[in-house]
């Protein structure tokens, strides 16, 4: 029986050489390169990086320039002035009234009228104003510093989210991989069973023609061959669909590929980690830590919004409002006290303190859940490994049972039904080992992701 299996596996391997072969690392790498979720995560990282750079510019002075030109339909500053009213009262008292009247009589009427009639004055009908200012924050309650730290935390969060997306992509691709690998192994088993049944059919046919066996035995073998052919067809269809799914997920253009993998199984003990230490390296735990850090920084910024702010500045101004060009520079300092904001600000600070406590509690609670998930994943690995070992033992027992029943049938002390039942038990044992093999690797994959590997 072993010789038949070896011959079939060698034949399948030779046929596979004509097809493209992919290993698990190759498919995982291809899936990460072609997945839309990871490309979206890259965009999010770049956006967070630009936001961090934007926050850094708040350290520099805020420079602004203003220009204004206007032309009004009338002067913005208008007044009516009588020249005689501009003479000081002291000067009027020095000149007697009769003398003033005599002088007025000697002057032309136009001069007297100009002196006593009001004069309209209009200014700033048009003009130009220009200024440039630079304002440098000196103290704003730590909002700039904490804002930059918060932007960096946002970038770190985007990177961690990409790690989670990569884990999800790898898990999905690996699940498809081992499902397809399982069907490939079952296909090999069916091919081996076909060889075995063909061999039995030839021997029984010869025995029937020689008159030493009943034709019913030949019919039983033929029915069993038909059943195996039906299984083979279902496997081919399942393999075809899984190839399409895996190829689409990994961005492959070839749908006629085969998988390469090592069928040997090593002890899982080398995979086990210290769960407390592994917890610190998981993306989920680090995201929780970043959430606490971000909440703490937001609390500091809330406090900073209720503190005084100080800034210094310098500027240069130009105008020609009074028909004369003037320019001047200046330096200044500003202090802003958010007095009325303190009323609501005290409640905002209390609210931010509650949010920080909530984030810290979530970190502690979810950390315990993550360690429970690791232990549960490890239990699954150990159980799958034991099931695989039991399945391998079952194959050895089923193979020996098949060998004995074939010898018994050829010796005439066993029926064809017993032989075919032994063959069915052997095929079921092989399929069970195949399922256990795929399940073991799936559980290993889940454990690696749970521990952040």
Image: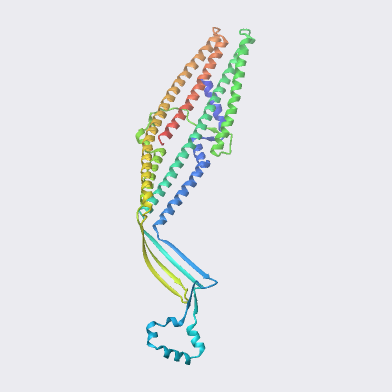
Q: Nearer the viewer, residue 361 or 430?
A: 361
- Residue 305 in sight here: no
**Which quadrant of the structure image shows residue 424?**
top right
- What residue is rendered at 45% in x and 27% in y? 440
- Residue 424 in sight here: yes
- The answer to whether 338 is drawn above or below residue 420 in the figure is below
- The answer to whether 296 is drawn above or below residue 441 in the figure is below
- The answer to whether 118 is drawn above or below residue 239 in the figure is below
The x and y percentages for residue 180 are: 53, 30
The x and y percentages for residue 27 are: 51, 37
Q: Quadrant of the C terminus?
A: top left
- What residue is rendered at 47% in x and 39% in y? 166
Q: Nearer the viewer, residue 442 or 320?
A: 320
Asked whether, in this view, residue 186 is left or right of residue 448, the answer is right
Q: Nearer the viewer, residue 266 or 372?
A: 372
Judged from this view, the residue extending furthest toward the bottom is 106
The x and y percentages for residue 337 are: 36, 56
Judged from this view, the residue extending furthest toward the front is 98
- What residue is rendered at 45% in x and 19% in y? 393
């Amino acid at each position: 029986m072993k010789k038949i299996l070896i011959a079939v596996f060698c034949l399948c391997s030779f046929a596979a050489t004509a097809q493209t072969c992919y290993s698990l690392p190759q498919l995982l790498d291809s899936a990460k390169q072609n997945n839309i979720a990871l490309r979206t995560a890259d965009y999010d990282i770049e956006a967070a990086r630009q936001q961090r750079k934007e926050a850094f510019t708040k350290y520099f002075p805020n420079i602004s320039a203003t220009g204004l030109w206007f032309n009004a339909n009338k002067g913005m500053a208008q007044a009516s002035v009588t020249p005689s009213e501009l003479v000081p009262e002291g000067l009027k008292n020095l000149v007697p009234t009769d003398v003033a009247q005599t002088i007025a009589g000697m002057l032309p009427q136009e001069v007297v009228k100009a002196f006593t009639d009001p004069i309209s004055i209009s200014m700033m009908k048009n003009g130009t104003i220009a200024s440039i200012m630079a304002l440098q924050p000196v103290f704003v309650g730590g909002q700039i510093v904490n804002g930059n730290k918060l932007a960096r935390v946002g970038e770190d969060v985007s990177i961690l989210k990409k790690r989670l997306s990569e884990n999800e992509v790898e898990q999905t691709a690996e699940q498809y991989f081992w499902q397809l690998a399982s069907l490939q192994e079952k296909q090999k088993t069916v091919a081996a069973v076909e060889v075995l049944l063909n061999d039995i059919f030839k021997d029984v046919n010869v025995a029937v023609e020689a008159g030493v066996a009943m034709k019913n035995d030949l019919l039983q073998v033929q029915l069993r061959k038909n059943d195996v052919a039906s299984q083979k067809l279902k496997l081919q269809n399942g393999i075809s669909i899984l190839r399409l799914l895996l190829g689409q997920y990994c961005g492959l253009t070839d749908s006629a590929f085969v998988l390469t993998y090592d069928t040997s199984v090593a002890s899982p003990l080398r995979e086990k980690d210290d769960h407390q230490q592994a917890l610190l390296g998981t993306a989920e735990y680090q995201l929780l830590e970043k959430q606490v850090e971000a909440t703490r920084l937001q609390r500091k910024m809330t406090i900073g919004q209720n503190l005084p702010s100080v800034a210094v500045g310098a500027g240069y101004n130009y105008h020609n409002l009074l028909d004369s060009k003037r320019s001047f520079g200046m330096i200044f300092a500003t202090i802003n006290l958010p007095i009325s904001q303190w009323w609501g600000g005290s409640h905002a600070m209390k609210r931010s303190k509650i949010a920080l406590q909530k984030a810290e509690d979530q970190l502690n609670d979810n950390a315990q859940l993550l360690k429970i998930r690791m232990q549960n994943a490890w239990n699954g690995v150990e159980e799958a490994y034991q099931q695989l070992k039991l399945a391998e033992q079952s194959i050895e027992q089923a193979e020996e049972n098949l060998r004995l029943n074939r010898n018994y049938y050829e010796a005439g002390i066993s029926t064809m039904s017993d032989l075919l039942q032994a063959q069915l038990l052997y095929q079921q044992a092989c399929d069970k080992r195949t399922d256990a093999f795929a399940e073991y690797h799936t559980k290993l994959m889940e454990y690696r992701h749970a521990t952040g590997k």
